[in-house]
Image (cartoon, rainbow, N blue to C red):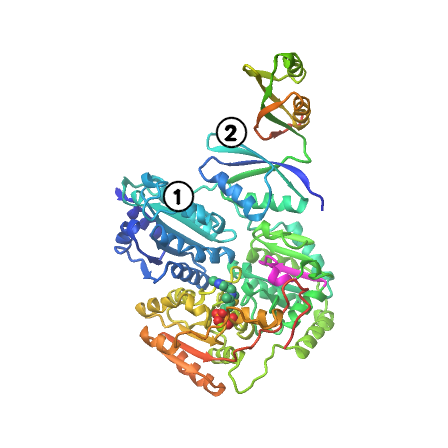
């Protein structure tokens, strides 16, 4: 059978089970869009290529499947970079196809030529320039394997125009053999035996769960481990939802804006079982004062995450779900004793921290942003898929929305990319058309990809945008308030559009609350609507996120309300 | 922790862009490359990179793990601390005034190097050896006058057990 490169690409995408592509066309990629239109694969036409990547990312995080993007060469390709870096930092499986000028023009500074493979080398898990149509199918298959396996990540494929439109006799590729790529899924049992011993002897243990638990689908195993051993669990920002936020053993988030009890327990504990985390500086604070009394068991599928930032007693390379499963089976064979009594002192101490220093804010006659998130949590019973922008809005979402399940909290953790939330919400809504998807946004961030409102309208995606509108780049303003003597350089956002009118201009619904008593009715009305809605909440302008650990300080030294 | 020289021998796919991935890993993460040499192996699809980096043990452990993580890296051998042979080659252009020629040739003899080019007032010498030999011959030639020098960077292989 003679097929063009573009047709071959469609064959492979169908074989990979791709049902949706987020894209934006251009000259060198017309052939591919032309073929795409003939398939059953749904194409979501975004309004900016950054939006395409974030949407594919939101789709992937919500569904656990590989997100796919298709864009043109040159500016189309460079516009994807921020999205790719976002996915790379959070280990999200994506395959991004960029158009490229014909192979014979590469290197000539041709119209809309950029070396996107060179540009994205440090922010992709791997990338390819396809030079011959014959290589295309194999490369695409490899890309899907690499993106989704091991520690997942984005893979980019650069497709020159002639590779897409050359006709060749197509043979489905043989089995893909990546000779040097063999991620370690199964843990070394000797290491797990050491972990069991530490668990048995620990008096003040905690579990620290991260995005790796969510990505591996290991929430069940994690929850079983915590319940079996009665060890309390703290999550990184990326780990929220891996363990039910409502469980009595849940400590909440750890880190710069972590809960008092989570941060204090890390300082006091004698054992940390860390799974799927990388001990980012926002988690550890000053590294040489982090968990000074604790032995650390570190489970991760990526060996480079282990011992990168902090020393560990028991390194375990392996998939979190599989490894935690094995650990549970080993623990089943152990006599753990009367855990109620054994843990009582430790859990009492933690409850004491919780009681004396809970997450709190002082309600006044101005809307508190925390109150909006709390109400949203109550009204949605913690069941919504929440995406966030970046800044204070993101931290309040993490603190006040308690996730019962994984894949419900979609946020740019590693890169902290403003403009992520709306397109990510669109992607999550495409993956789950019948679920409630809410973007908790800041007034600054939402303007970075607001154009995607048109995408939501075009495909009738009823995403809800909740803007915590403080008319500031609030998180930066908070640092200025606390560490720069209130010099608010370049953080005022008074010149913003009227978000209600803006929603209406896009054909969506716009609602606004300016007083505390309007919060609930606006949320009820907005959430109940079958349409795309922007809800603009005029919140206390100079509210700060607390607790806060100043950058570089020990994680137990928190500024509190 | 103390920094030390580490020789890494890395087998990689012989493809365009692979060296750039490795160089990018080093520059992006602030590791340094002291010396580098690359060529295809017996298998034309595989190249061997021999590299020297200076780092403490924790960093070199990270470097090795990060190298492994690159899809095109097939194998990484850390040679430092094991038994290995190492060689480097240099081409050295020395000033060869008639009255110094005998002295230069004596050095050539002692170090078992070769004269590969002769001109009006220069010799070009080819030297192969380990680092110690390189330093020694350069020290001897320096007072005579070195005009130019090109070195390959170190190549190394494990010693097989006898
Ligand atoms: C693309 C990008 N640019 C700059 C920053 C730095 N930054 C972090 S938070 C923040 C303020 C965000 O303002 P807003 O969206 O209004 O959220 P708020 O903190 O007020 O809730 C900024 C500018 C960033 N994270 N991302
Ligand atoms: Mg703001």
Question: A273 or B8, which lies in front?
Answer: B8
Within 10 Å of disc 2 (Cα), the crowding (few <14, some 14-19, many 20+) is: some
Residue A282 magenta:
yes
Region rendered in magenta: A270-285
From the viewer's perspective, is residue B109 above or below residue A376? above
Q: Which residue is mark 1?
A: A129
The answer to the question of whether label 1 and label 2 lie on touching residues, with beta carbons closer than 8 A, is: no
Within 10 Å of disc 1 (Cα), the crowding (few <14, some 14-19, many 20+) is: many
Q: Which residue is mark 2?
A: B41
- How many badges with numbers are in the image? 2
The N terminus of chain A lies in quadrant: top left
Residue A446 magenta:
no
Is any atom of residue A303 visible in this view? yes
Query: Mark 1 — on which chain does it sit?
Result: A
Is any atom of residue A15 visible in this view? no
Question: B30 or B102, which lies in front?
Answer: B102
């Amino acid at each position: 059978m003679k097929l063009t490169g573009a047709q071959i690409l469609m064959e492979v995408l169908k074989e990979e089970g791709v049902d949706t592509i987020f894209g934006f066309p251009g000259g060198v990629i017309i052939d591919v869009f032309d073929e795409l239109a003939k398939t059953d694969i749904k194409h979501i036409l975004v309004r900016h290529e950054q939006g395409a990547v974030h949407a594919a990312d939101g789709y992937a995080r919500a569904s656990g499947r590989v997100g796919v993007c298709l864009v043109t060469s040159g500016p189309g390709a460079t516009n994807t970079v921020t999205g790719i870096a976002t996915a790379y930092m959070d280990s999200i499986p994506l395959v991004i196809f960029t158009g490229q000028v014909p192979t014979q023009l590469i290197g000539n500074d041709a119209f809309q030529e950029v070396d996107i493979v060179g540009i994205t080398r440090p922010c992709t898990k791997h990338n390819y320039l396809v030079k011959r149509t014959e290589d295309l199918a194999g490369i695409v298959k490899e890309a899907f394997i690499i993106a989704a396996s091991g520690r997942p990540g984005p893979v980019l494929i650069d497709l020159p125009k002639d590779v897409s439109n050359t006709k060749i006799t197509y043979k489905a590729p043989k089995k893909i053999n990546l000779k040097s790529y063999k991620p370690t899924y199964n843990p070394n049992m000797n290491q797990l035996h050491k972990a069991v011993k530490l668990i048995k002897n620990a008096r003040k243990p905690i579990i620290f769960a991260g995005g790796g638990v969510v990505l591996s689908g290991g929430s069940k195993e994690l929850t079983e481990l915590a319940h079996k051993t009665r060890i309390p669990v703290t999550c990184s920002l990326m780990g929220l939802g891996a363990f039910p936020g409502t469980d009595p053993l849940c400590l909440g988030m750890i880190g710069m804006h972590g809960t008092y009890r989570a941060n204090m327990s890390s300082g006091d504990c004698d054992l940390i079982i860390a799974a799927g985390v990388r001990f980012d500086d926002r988690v550890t604070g000053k590294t040489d004062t982090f968990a000074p009394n604790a032995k650390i068991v570190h489970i991760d599928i990526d060996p480079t995450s282990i011992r990168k930032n902090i020393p560990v007693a028991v390194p375990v390379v392996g998939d979190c779900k599989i490894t935690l499963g094995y650990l549970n089976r080993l623990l089943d064979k152990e006599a753990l004793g009367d855990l109620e009594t054994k843990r009582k002192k430790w859990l009492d101490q933690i409850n004491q921290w919780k009681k004396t220093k809970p997450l709190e804010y002082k309600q006044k006659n101005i809307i508190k942003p925390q109150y909006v998130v709390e109400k949203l949590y109550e009204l949605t019973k913690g069941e919504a898929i929440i995406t966030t922008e970046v800044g204070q809005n993101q931290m309040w979402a993490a603190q006040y929305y308690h996730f019962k399940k994984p894949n419900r909290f979609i946020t740019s953790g590693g890169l902290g990319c403003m403009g992520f939330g709306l397109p990510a919400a669109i992607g999550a809504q495409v993956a789950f058309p019948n679920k409630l998807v809410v973007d908790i946004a800041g007034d600054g961030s939402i303007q970075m990809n607001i154009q995607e409102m048109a995408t939501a309208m075009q495909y009738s995606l009823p995403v809800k945008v909740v803007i915590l509108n403080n008319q500031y780049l609030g998180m930066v303003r908070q640092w200025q308030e606390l560490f720069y003597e209130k010099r608010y350089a370049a953080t005022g956002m008074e010149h913003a559009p009227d978000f209600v009118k803006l929603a209406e201009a896009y054909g969506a619904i716009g609602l606004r609350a300016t007083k505390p008593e309007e919060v609930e009715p606006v949320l009820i009305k907005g959430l109940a609507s079958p349409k795309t809605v922007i809800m603009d909440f005029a919140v206390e302008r100079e509210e700060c996120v607390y607790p806060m650990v100043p950058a570089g300080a020990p994680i137990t030294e928190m500024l509190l309300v | 922790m103390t920094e030390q020289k580490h020789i890494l021998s890395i087998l990689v796919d012989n493809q365009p862009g692979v060296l750039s991935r490795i160089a990018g890993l080093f520059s992006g993460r602030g590791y340094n490359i002291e010396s580098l040499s690359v060529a295809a192996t017996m298998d034309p699809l595989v190249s061997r990179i021999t590299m020297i980096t200076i780092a403490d043990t924790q960093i070199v452990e990270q470097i090795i793990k990060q190298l492994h993580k690159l899809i095109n890296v097939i194998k990484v051998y850390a040679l430092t601390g094991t038994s290995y042979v190492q060689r480097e080659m240099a081409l050295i252009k020395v000033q060869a005034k008639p009255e110094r020629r005998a002295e230069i040739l004596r050095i050539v003899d002692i170090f078992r190097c070769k004269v590969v080019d002769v001109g009006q007032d220069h010799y070009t010498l080819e030297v192969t050896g380990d680092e110690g030999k390189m330093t020694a011959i350069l020290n001897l030639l320096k007072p005579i006058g070195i005009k130019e020098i090109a070195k390959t960077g170190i190549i190394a292989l494990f010693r097989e057990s006898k």
